[in-house]
Amino acid sequence: MARLMIRTAAWTGAISGLVIVYLAMVGMIERLDTLPIIGTVGMDTILIFVPAAVGGWVVTRPRVVAGERRTATTGAGVVLGAAEGLAAGSVVELGVVLVSALGIETVRQVFSAVSPSLIEIMRFHMAAVPAALVLLVATTVVGGLGGLLSVLPRSVRGPVATGATAIVVVALLRQVIAPAFDQMKIERDWLYSPITLGLTWIGGLVMFVLTAATVRLRVGHRLATILVPSRYPSAVPAEPEGAAAEATGEGLLAEGRDAFGAGISRRGIAIVAWCVIAAIVAVLPYLVGPVVSRILGTVGIFLLLGLGLNIVVGFAGLLDLGYVAFFAVGAYFTAILTGGQRVTFTGYEAPTFGLHLSFYVALPIVVAVAAFVGLVIGAPVLRLRGDYLAIVTLGFGEIARVIFGSTWAQNLFGGSLGMSSITAAEIPGVNLNFQSDPRHFYFLVLVFCLLAVFVSWRLQGSRVGRAWNAMREDEQVADAMGISTTRFKLLAFAMGGAIGSIGGALFAVSLGSLTIASFQILVSITALSVIILGGLGSIPGVVVGALVLIGLPGLLTQFADYRLLIYGAVLIAIMLLRPQGLVPNVRVSRELREDERSQDQWAKHLLEEDAADAPQPTGGALT
Amino acid sequence: MTHLLEVAGVAKHFGGLYALDGLDLHVDEGEIVGVIGPNGAGKSTVFNVITGLYTPDAGDIRFRGESLLGRLPSQVTKLGIARTFQNVKLFPNMTVLENAMVGQHCRSHAGVVGAIFGTRKTREEEARIRERAQDALAFFGSRLSGYRQDQSANTLSYANRRRLEMARAMATEPALLLLDEPTAGMNPRETLELRDHIKRMRDERGLTILVIEHDMRVVKGVSDRVVALDYGHRIAQGTYEEVANDAQVIEAYLGTKAVG
């Protein structure tokens, strides 16, 4: 057993070490050397040691051996973690030695990011031998800490891990947080050092304590309870035993009283809390400034795409990989309806068909066109399911891109050069687009996002939503229960397309110009990633997904070169650790909760039935 | 008098296999008809052609004198024929109540506009859907009511899943209910209970029932008339006693005596 554990530790350490070496070889560590996190510690140091700590954590996680859950003791946890760290450090050191021995010029022929300064960083600006010792000792300690953290009780582990993460996040989000402090005229030099631009040690400590306390006191959960009381019933969830009490009528009465007595104040708190959130959302652009507002505008556009796609995929279960078609329809039709000019090699020309409508007049037309396109795309694929549907819709997405960018439609849509001079949406005197002020555009996007959230929410709880849900779960049975699957599939495509086209329309007016390059298949994939990351079928999930997948990459410009690398890693990690998404659909989470409970119930039920039936004869042959 | 349901000379074959081969069958208003037959006799295929899942190769199916040929399953359900499946097919991740509410779908009309604006008509209809779904669940007493209504269907015990499937079918407000082996997998006590439920469905709710069943105690207990199938056609019909003593039926189940 011990031998097995050591071997696991060595393997995990080797993998962590290789991750560190990889990060170094692609240039991430050197590139982020100048990115300060806390005190004099930079992002490079974090990148060198975090994988070792994570490895230590992983090695020490409880594992199931022969059906038995085994948890390491504290001592064993530290030792295993340290062993893992040592292994990781050794691999990294081996890498450093190898690169030095081969000569940097040789290695550079393959890994162009390797440079003398990288070696300097990996050696902590020290001589080779002491540096090796420092590295090994440091990774061992860090690995041991990771192991220790993992065997500590949950009440300690969660807060500490989150607190440590918060330090890095707060340091990285300086661009957002610092201007907000300035806007509110709050002193911030205690938090961000004016010299290094990273967190000060004091600031880091405060952030750590704040976050750890937040997690320890389950503030998030409490807040959620206040904000969405329906999702977290105040009374003890109806346990099976509750049913017995209910039968006598007492349980029902007691529950009713409870809900009534606590109901008013809870409701009051919820309203106040929502008002606070609304107020923050309303002043957000002025807190965070134009740069971040622009990012929020983009988040909003993808939120609309996500909400639309969520109707098709999340509600109705129709996997659509060509959703970019609706984005393009929304953008191009807005362009020709609001006076967009075709870009040609000699200048600008009016399209063969074009109107000079205001954005608000054009939008309903655009939405109607998109809904119609939804029907057109939906009709031929009615009989297809799953993978086949996905492939065909993928084709439709490409067809849309080809049509809008083609030469034969160039008199209408500008071909490969695209369109320009699209009139911005405006409220009298103010242009709502990125050029004039992204903060104003934010409000335009916000209005449509709220609208789309409302529509999604209403649909989800309606007869239509129920029909979609039934269809997603079992199309054949839904049909047999009287749901016209043809009708509701088309409806899903049309509704999804309509909402997505609003995203396209806003995209067109935000920039004032568009080219076919903006309508690549990557848009479809991003929109799908947003809803899967957030949790399929979950409206808050789409919001969180858009913020994480669109907002964070926009904010963390320091990582811009490695965006897709991190993007991929995050998606893999989330799908492994939390396949139901960040904010799962209520139905899914309810299922997970009840699964645990029903296990025992199920067995108990069987036992009771068996006992009752024991004396009775069985069988029923034709006699 | 026309029969409520009339299956006339229906044939259905899959490649060379004749699942149904000139089947004649009728059900009258208010009857409970039991369908029996050995495995592979074509019992479930009958249900599938009646409900529009399969298109028959020959013959006609008439419901209240109107042909069902060429109609989609959803249209057949709307006309008033509901069914359950041999291997229970619920919407497992929807709650018990939602499952029953889906049954009410074909008796309601609210669309996208009503849902978004929450018109009074839509809200009233939604309340009615809920009420009728609860009524269908209440048919099975406390088994599907109370706290269980808001649990997802996949947490139910096997017997309760079967009951929910029947409740969902009843929620479509059918005239004719097709039950495909409703007691399969149930223990003897549950089977007897269900036998009473089937009778009550007719007596209290006025449903006409066509039931495929293997448990002969149930067939005997509920059927006004029994139809025996083998090789895709009817080999006997009549009261339970008549059919049970029919030479052809006994042969179908037990085989012929070896000669020699």
Image (cartoon, coloured by chain):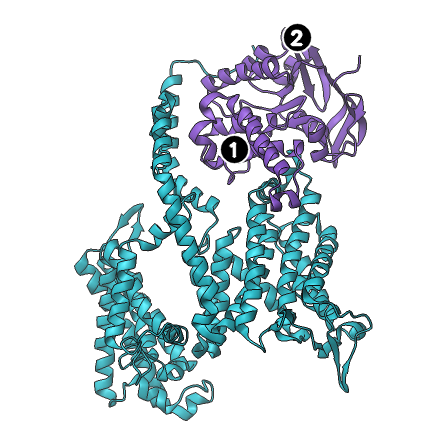
**Residues beneath discs 1 and 2 located on the same chain:** yes
Looking at the image, is A615 positioned above or below residue B131?
above
**Chain for colour purple:** B
Whether residue A276 is situated above or below residue A49 in the rendered picture:
above
From where the camera sits, is residue A298 visible? no
Taking the spot 29% from the left edge, 81% from the top edge, the residue there is: A193
| Residue that badge 1 annotates | B97
- Hey, which residue is sitting farthest front in the picture? A428
Q: Give A49 or A36, whichever is nearer the viewer.
A: A36
Q: Which secondary structure lies at badge 1?
A: helix
The picture quadrant where one finds residue A427 is: bottom right
Three-letter code, disc 2 = Thr
Relative image position of residue A367 (x, y in whole percent): 69, 58
Element type at marker 2? loop
Q: Is residue B59 above or below residue A65?
A: above
Q: Position of residue A242 (x, y in %)?
A: 35, 29
Percent position (x, y) of residue B58?
Answer: 81, 29
Q: Amino acid at mark 1?
A: Leu
* Spot occupied by residue A344 in the image (x, y as percentages of width and height): 76, 82
- Judging from the image, mark 2 belongs to the subunit labelled B
Residue wearing tag 2: B239
**For residue B52, which quarter of the picture?**
top right
Disc assigned to residue A52: none
Foreground residue among A293 and B254:
A293
Nearest the viewer among A56 and A68 is: A56
Label 1: how many Cα within 10 Å (few below 14, some 14–19, many 20+): many
Which chain is the one coloured cyan?
A
